[in-house]
Image: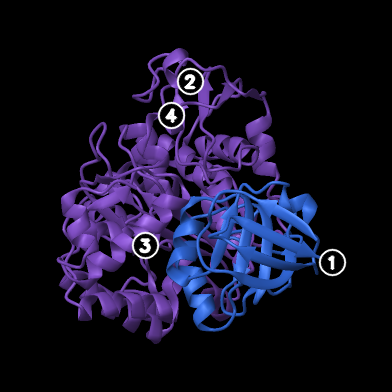
Chain colours: A purple, B blue
Amino acid sequence: MRLTAEEEAIRAGRQGEPPRRALEMQLAVGKFFGAERMVPVTSAHLTGDPESMGEAGLAFVEDLVRQGARFVVPTTTNSCNVDFDLYRAFGQPEEVAQQERRLRELITAMGGVLLTSCANYQALDPPGFGEHLAWGDTGTVIYANAVCGARSNFEGGPASYAAALTGLVPAYGMHLDACRRGTHLVEVRDQPKNVSDWGALGVFVGRQLTNYWLVPVFTGIEAEPDSDGLKHLGATLASYGSLAMFHVVGVTPEAPTLEDAFGGRPPRTTITVEPGDLERTYRSFVPEKAEVDLVVFGTPHLSIQEIRRLAALLAGARVSPSTMLLLTTSGHVKAMADREGLTRAIEAAGGRIVVGVCYYIMTPREMARRHGLRTIVTDSAKLANIITAYGYNPIFRPTAQCVDAAVTGRIPR
Amino acid sequence: MIVLTGHPGVGDLVEGEALVSAEGFSARYDLDRATGTISRESHPLYGRSIAGRVLVCPLAKGGFATSWALLDLKSRGLAPVAMLFGWANPVMVQGAVLAGVALMDQLSPDPMSAIRTGDRVRVDPQAARVEVWR
């Protein structure tokens, strides 16, 4: 790789050990993927919570701080394991809360902002067109690439720290025009009608395109999706397919036309979404039993619009005493929900708004053991995908059916 | 002996016994990281441990958890010694770099057909070469 004089200085250790070590890691990754140079980034979004990092990951961050590390670009944090106001009520391990406290001290010491959200683009300003980023959470990356026209690879935990310390990333993958162009055409003949339908569309396509280097191009969509619909489409494509980019012709910024989306190349193949495919996608999640233990909304974090809709669906209803209802969102959105009286309304119905966490990192094994949770109903296909490995039976359904499941405590088989 | 070649990978020369998965792999979606065993019930390797093995998969799946998981697994003696993918993704490579686990992808011939579970595999990422005995 060709390095600038400034990058050579970092490599020689003239900025200290943390950026030197960070750059060495980045060069190894860049070399693997054939990067020819490094590129400066405008921000980093750290992915790392004690549950995912383990003791060894936490020790890696402790080392950085001991060596005097400082972030050189604006740096925010992704979701975390505990809401400090609620974790005791849920019976989550005190040890995890202590690790979370310590991690926050370390990140603050390096200059990071404790955003604790996996929908950073809805909590803060979304990135601008063409900005290079070092974001970690896959749902944030695909949204930045596809919807904003910014440029980021999946910069996982250690890689997001490395980028925050050097202000650089290796220029491969989504930083290059050639990797952002469409590879597969998706003809949509089953129109998404709500937020979770966009997730179902993402599942349908993401199950067929399971490779980071593939880019679906959606056509035939009649109603322009809003930010929440695109959030769920992107998060599910990233979750099921490990994809980092998509185009919606006439909607997303790099796809004003089909030709633009494909960069003049023909699609490798066409995927057709036939009428009924979205419903069949929901039905591919089969309940083992009719009783519902848990209903969760908010992977990725809920927007204020989504919380308004949930509060309206819950109006006058009461969550079944045998079912737990959780909504997860950022502190920003929760503050708005408080002001609008939505938090009070949702709590009155028997639900809880949990701040900063995503359920799949909210110590789900301990939650299952402590509260006897097995059947989880959610309108997030991403959560349904991940939570299986934690011993749950996940049922992905449209938002309104999930609210019904919370109220009746049952899911039709 | 079968020889597979490709582009240089990450990590150093290692040897181990192959564990071949017909499905892709993610440390979050498929693995109980406390024990190093595959915990997704529908995964073809459900219940199997990846510790000390040369894991062979068509694809790297999933998100950032994988980039931390290999270091955590290695610190507890539960990491694979090497991973061979049809196609790797960035988080898997970042995790392998942090942990010092050997990783290669896009080998020829395809390791999914050239390697069987139980084969002895020697992975030399810097030489861009994999050797297989059975």
Question: Chain under label 4?
Answer: A
Q: Amino acid at mark 4?
A: Ala
**Residue that numbered label 2 is attached to:** A262
Q: CA distance from mark 4 to mark 3?
A: 24 Å
**Residue that numbered label 3 is attached to:** A25
Q: Amino acid at mark 1?
A: Arg
Image spot of residue A152 (x, y percent): 35, 43
Image spot of residue A56 (x, y percent): 42, 79
**Residue that numbered label 4 is attached to:** A178
Are marks 3 and 1 in one subunit? no
Res. A119 visible in picture:
yes
Callout 3 secondary element: helix
Q: In the figure, residue A136 lies in which quadrant?
A: bottom left
Marks 2 & 4, CB-CB < 8 Å contact: no
Comparing A377 with A254, the one in front is A254
Question: Chain under label 3?
Answer: A
Marks 3 & 1, CB-CB < 8 Å contact: no
Above or below residue B36? Residue B57 is above
Q: Amino acid at mark 2?
A: Phe
- N-terminal label among 3 and 2: 3
Image spot of residue A202 (x, y percent): 55, 38
Q: How would you rate the neighbour count of disc 3 (Cα within 10 Å): few for under 14, some for 14-19, many for 20 or more?
A: some
**Residue that numbered label 1 is attached to:** B134
- N-terminal label among 2 and 4: 4
Marks 3 & 2, CB-CB < 8 Å contact: no
